[in-house]
Image: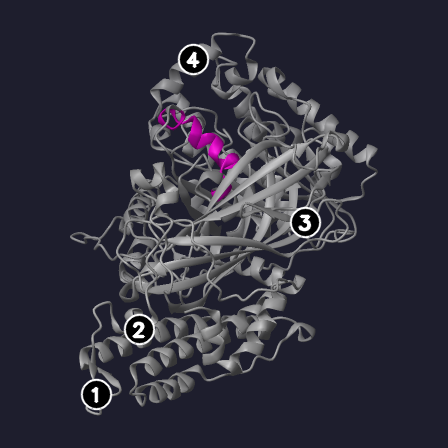
């Protein structure tokens, strides 16, 4: 039975279907059966499902300098071969003005050809393609199959440096690829946004929408070409068995009996019940898709500004389903009943198609694109982020229980089930396998109003109290009071269904600070200093997240180049002079009116920054200091490092007297510890002038000790020897001025990383560099906390 028979069954529905064809830019029927090309050795499937995915290329940009030239992005989509299916791709919209617009070739979406001139300025692509998939499903497992469906999006970037080198725009070189996983949801489909990053540090921003749009009886079989004979002689196996409409709806073993009148035929009750179950199963799935999608579409429309709102007609699908069911059950003739069931399913699918077509037009609005992007960002806020408030003076004391609690919580989080994302790109972050757990320790004055759940509660106890609750709950703020109570309660065991509540940090306190003159009128200068042997590219990803998140202020970045490579092994005091001159020259050359200065350092770069702050030439800028963000900074040197391998490595490096900065970090630049560079630096002013002092460390970082990165006491320093006493004095020298300044916000972070088993992770260097190279960490860190420090 073909499309002509469908027309005869549902004449009133056809105009809307033809309107949908116009929406899609093609003069074809969206329900027509496309010749299948993929199959599997499964039993005969009775349901034919059509899913459509809209892929919108938004913007392309380089996070690091890209080659100037011409680029093109190819995107292909696939679902598992275990599901018999066919696919067809088509262009829905392409950007205007391109000499080579978007196109489709062998079901691959090819964007328009665009040119990159300045890597700091993104290129708007604005191409939209539709991937239409027709799949055969088991009628009893429709919902189960679709909710478990995972698709693969593969992006390829092609490049040519010169325009004249093109041969019909096909002769371009593949330079990098990336793969994303798409997880389908029957209830309303999927609607999300992602910024996918490639190996060359280019970024593609795209939006994807997906929906089940049609469910109907499967009236065409997919040819099975999986056997050896069919692969060798494919032309011998082109003929397939086409099921009849009645065999699909009533069952393959249907048998008709002659009625009493001897003219008409009747069907046994069990076959009728099969038909009613078939109709009920498909209608339920269509209703799930329609209701969820209608609800999503309506909520989005209500959220957008008035000019973008769209009044949607409420069709009351449940009432219509009830009416259709009543009409179908009144039919006695088997042929008419099969046609009626088929027509009712097509009518319901038609309503879904019309709504989908309207949505596709609506999704092209820039406001809609911004809404989807913001929703994707909000979903990441608060995930695996735990914030604890401490008394301010507690920053000076040693408390091993805090570290133990972080380890214990991370272990339980790692072993607990997590909700899967509708869209993710596992290969984008080669540093960590899954999002890290971030622990925030905020040190507040008692007068600042700590917000406990109840006195004496600790972070772990709160987690136990909320066992079994879902992640998306109201934020929990934890007040840390009794260190002795941090250990897991005795006898408590984590059950398999343990789900960690979302523990969000409290907002940054709004203090009545004395406003500095011209603060809002000038430029916020952010200086980034790399680590030992590094370069100005090392903190580019950090810069990217700040630039993307801070949009209401004039921000200028200085990516330091004055101490790159082997120069970073020189005396730290000399390196500080280089950085200071670089800052002053940058301000003079760009003629900046600086209202704020923030510093971001990685590893050794943090010590160089602190050495700059106490130089007389910088004194004029002390009143403009805003945020000091330290990633893995060896503020207390590399004393009490737990890694034997790195101790040996550092000792070997220190044997070379030319490696002065390494000697200084190891307190080997003077026989008297109190005359070493780091000790004397601790006695000088600097950090207390900042509004925010933010320290990031990790227990998995074996290059820089955890306690050194977080400027805190450690167990080894408690011993009553000279070096331990010196270490304790350094901690107090640095922190006491910071803690006494009530206008200075002091925060420590601990990140727990799920790293792959590599040599670098084994020796601990991967845990050190992950702070500035892991996309998952940086995105989570800045969305949840760090952007506030640069507002």
Q: Residues within 10 Å of mark 4 (few under 14, many from 20)?
A: some
Residue highlighted by disc 1: 259
Q: Residues within 10 Å of mark 3 (few under 14, many from 20)?
A: many
Cα separation between marks 1 and 2: 18 Å
Look at the image and tell me whether residue 270 can be seen.
yes
Residue 422 position within the rendered picture, expressed as x and y whole percent measured from the top left: 44, 55
| Residue that appears at 57% across and 64% down | 28
Residue highlighted by disc 4: 651
Residue 182 position within the rendered picture, expressed as x and y whole percent measured from the top left: 44, 52
Q: Earlier in the sequence, mark 4 or mark 2?
A: 2
In front: label 3 or label 2: 2
Cα separation between marks 3 and 4: 53 Å
Residue highlighted by disc 3: 125
Cα separation between marks 4 and 2: 82 Å
**Any mark on residue 246, and which?**
2
Cα separation between marks 1 and 3: 65 Å
Residue 341 position within the rendered picture, expressed as x and y whole percent measured from the top left: 36, 78
Q: Residues within 10 Å of mark 2 (few under 14, many from 20)?
A: many
Look at the image and tell me whether residue 571 can be seen.
no
């Amino acid at each position: 039975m073909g499309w002509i028979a469908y027309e005869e069954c549902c004449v009133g529905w056809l105009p809307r279907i033809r309107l949908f064809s116009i929406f899609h830019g093609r003069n074809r029927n969206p329900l027509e059966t496309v010749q299948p090309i993929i199959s599997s050795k499964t039993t005969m499937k009775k349901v034919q499902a059509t899913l459509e995915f809209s892929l919108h290329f938004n913007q392309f940009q380089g996070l690091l300098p890209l080659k100037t030239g011409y680029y093109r992005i190819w995107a292909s989509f696939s679902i598992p071969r275990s599901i018999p299916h066919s696919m067809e791709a088509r262009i829905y919209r392409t950007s205007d003005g391109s000499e080579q617009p978007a196109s489709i070739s062998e079901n691959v979406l090819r964007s328009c050809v665009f040119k990159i001139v300045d890597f700091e300025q993104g290129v708007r692509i604005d191409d939209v393609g539709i991937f239409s998939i027709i799949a055969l499903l088991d009628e009893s497992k429709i919902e189960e199959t679709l909710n478990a469906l995972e698709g693969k999006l593969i992006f390829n970037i092609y490049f040519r440096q010169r325009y004249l080198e093109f041969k019909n725009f096909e002769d371009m070189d593949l330079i990098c690829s990336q793969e994303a996983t798409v997880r389908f949801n029957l209830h309303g489909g999927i609607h999300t946004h992602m910024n996918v990053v490639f190996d060359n540090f280019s970024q593609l921003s795209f939006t994807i929408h997906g929906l089940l749009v049609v469910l109907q009886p499967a009236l065409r079989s997919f040819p099975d070409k999986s056997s050896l004979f069919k692969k060798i002689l494919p032309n011998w196996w082109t003929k397939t068995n086409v099921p009849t409409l009645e065999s699909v709806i009533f069952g393959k073993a249907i048998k008709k009996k002659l009625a009493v009148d001897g003219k008409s035929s009747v069907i046994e009750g069990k076959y009728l019940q099969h038909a009613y179950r078939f109709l009920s199963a498909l209608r339920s799935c269509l209703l799930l898709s329609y209701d969820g999608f209608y609800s999503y579409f309506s909520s989005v429309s209500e959220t957008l500004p008035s000019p973008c709102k769209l009044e949607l007609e409420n069709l009351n699908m449940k009432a219509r389903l009830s009416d259709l069911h009543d009409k179908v059950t009144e039919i006695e003739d088997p042929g008419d009943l099969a046609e009626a069931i088929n027509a009712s399913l097509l009518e319901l699918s038609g309503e879904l198609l019309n709504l989908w077509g309207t949505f596709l037009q609506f999704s092209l609005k820039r406001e809609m694109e911004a809404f989807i992007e913001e929703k994707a960002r909000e979903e990441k806020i608060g995930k695996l982020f735990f914030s604890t408030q401490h008394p301010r003076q507690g920053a000076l004391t040693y408390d091993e229980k805090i570290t133990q609690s972080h380890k214990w919580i991370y272990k339980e989080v790692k072993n607990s089930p997590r909700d899967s994302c509708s869209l993710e790109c596992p290969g984008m972050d080669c540093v960590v396998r899954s999002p890290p757990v971030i622990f925030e320790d905020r040190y507040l004055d008692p007068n600042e109003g700590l917000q406990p759940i109840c006195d004496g509660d600790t972070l772990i106890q709160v987690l136990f109290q909320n066992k079994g609750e879902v992640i998306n709950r109201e934020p929990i703020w934890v007040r840390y009071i009794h260190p002795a109570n941090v250990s897991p309660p005795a006898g408590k065991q984590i059950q398999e269904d343990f789900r960690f509540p979302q523990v969000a940090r409290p907002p940054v306190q709004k203090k009545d600070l004395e406003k500095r003159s011209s603060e809002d009128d000038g430029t916020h200068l952010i200086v980034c200093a790399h680590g030992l042997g590094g370069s100005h590219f090392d903190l580019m990803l950090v810069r990217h997240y700040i630039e993307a998140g801070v949009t209401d202020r004039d921000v200028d970045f200085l990516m330091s180049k004055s101490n790159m490579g082997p120069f970073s092994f020189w005396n730290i005091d000399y390196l500080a002079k280089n950085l200071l001159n670089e800052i002053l020259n940058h301000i003079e050359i760009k003629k900046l009116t600086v209202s704020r200065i923030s510093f971001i350092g990685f590893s050794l770069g943090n010590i160089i920054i602190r050495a700059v702050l106490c130089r007389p030439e910088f004194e004029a800028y002390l009143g403009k200091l805003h945020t000091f963000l330290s990633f893995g900074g060896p503020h207390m040197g590399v004393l009490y490092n737990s890694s034997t391998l790195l101790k040996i490595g550092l000792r070997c490096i220190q044997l070379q007297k030319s490696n002065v900065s390494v000697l200084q970090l190891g307190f080997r630049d003077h026989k008297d510890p109190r005359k070493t560079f780091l000790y004397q630096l601790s006695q000088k002013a600097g950090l207390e002038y900042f509004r925010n002092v933010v320290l990031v460390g990790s227990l998995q970082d074996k290059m820089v000790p955890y306690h050194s990165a977080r400027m805190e006491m450690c167990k080894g320093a408690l011993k009553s020897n000279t070096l331990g006493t010196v270490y304790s004095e350094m901690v107090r020298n640095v922190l006491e001025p910071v803690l006494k300044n009530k206008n200075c916000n002091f925060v420590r972070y601990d990140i727990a990383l799920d790293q792959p088993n590599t040599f670098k992770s084994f020796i601990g260097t991967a845990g050190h560099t992950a702070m500035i190279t892991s996309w998952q960490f940086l995105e989570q860190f800045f969305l949840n906390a760090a952007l506030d420090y640069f507002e």
